[in-house]
Image (spheres, rainbow, N blue to C red):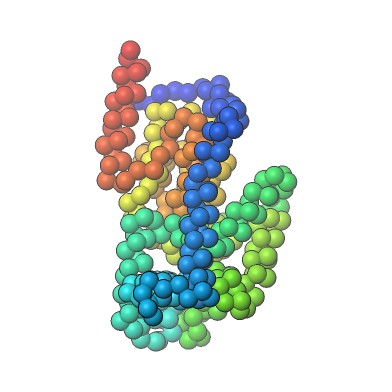
Amino acid sequence: MSALPSFSKADALASTEKVHNLSGGARVWSWRYIVLRRFTQVGFLLLFFGTAHWGWEVAKDVPLLAGNLSASKFIGLIPLTDPFAALQIFLTGHVLQQESLIGVAVVLGIYLLIGGRVFCAWVCPVNVVTDAAGWLRNRLGILAIFHLPRMLRYFVLAASLLITMISGLAAFEWVSPVGMAHREIIFGLGLGFTALLAIFLFDLLILKHGWCGHLCPLGAFYSLLGKTALIRVRFDKNTCTHCGECAKVCPEPQVLNLKKLEERGVVFSGECSNCGRCTPICPEGSLKFDFKPLIRSHNVQADAIAVQRRTK
Ligand code: SF4
Ligand code: SF4
């Protein structure tokens, strides 16, 4: 293993300067994943909305995307079932139909490959609201008034499953702001917009990244799936100056613990949502999306290049 290059505080400050002095074009380019995420989030809503209200079909009587975020069917063929919703239904004692089980397998397969919390950053409509609250909170310079442990979401997850078992009702499905928001946007039913406003105000005024980062049991459930993801953020320890700019934009900054990144060469935690905020902001190009089986060899190459540079 090669020795780490030693960067000084001045190097880190120079990296921060680079971020602050981005040209207009480079700044816009650094927003590319945010723009793409908004397209996919709105795109999914549009597919549901267009199918429900404008009768979008791929053939006669074959709807494009019918259902909701808990259970839907794509092009009349592919069932998609939220595994957390299915788990709750299973715990109520109901037998899951074969189609639901296939839907669970499809969704599990997708998220085991690309990262469970990709749902959070690229699909969930609540994320648009929590991102907006986080952005406004930074702009207004609102300071933290208290802290909660991020582990809390796993207790909420366990509690929601326990309540489901005891009550015989799918506990989180009844109160899920994700489902409520989706129902109100697509079908005009329920109190989804009220739930979104409450989350916005909570994240803006009370706790930074409060809902998604501390409380949401669905995000916690997908974090557990995320550990196996094949698409990962790779970390190059040879170029990182420890400026900390990545952690400033990351909604889960604990996953960018530099000591752990140096040990593993990759953002390992399933709590990373592959949102892509950190990769374009890093002024040294130390964070990049990569395919997990290639990360080790890419890091070995990066180490070799760094050693060559140092010995020149
Ligand atoms: S990885 Fe993070 S701390 Fe390291 S140089 Fe990039 S932005 Fe700075
Ligand atoms: S590590 Fe990067 S990709 Fe993962 S959540 Fe943080 S900013 Fe997003």
Regarding residue 99, the answer to whether it shows in the image is yes
Where does the C terminus fall, quadrant-wise? top left
Q: Is residue 181 left or right of residue 138?
A: left
Q: Residue drawn 65% across and 54% down?
A: 133
Where does the N terminus fall, quadrant-wise? top left
Q: Residue drawn 61% across and 76% down?
A: 188
Residues 286 and 166: in front is 286
Q: Position of residue 91 (x, y in %)?
A: 41, 81
Q: Position of residue 53 (x, y in %)?
A: 53, 75
Q: Is residue 89 left or right of residue 190?
A: left
Regarding residue 244, the answer to whether it shows in the image is no
Q: Residue furthest front?
A: 60
Query: Above or below — where is 260 with respect to 1?
Result: below
Q: Residue drawn 64% across and 48% down?
A: 135
Q: Position of residue 21 (x, y in %)?
A: 60, 28
Q: Position of residue 250 (x, y in %)?
A: 53, 46
Q: Residue furthest top?
A: 312
Query: Above or below — where is 253 with respect to 309?
Result: below
Query: Above or below — where is 244 with respect to 217?
Result: above
Specify the quadrant of the image occupied by residue 76.
bottom left
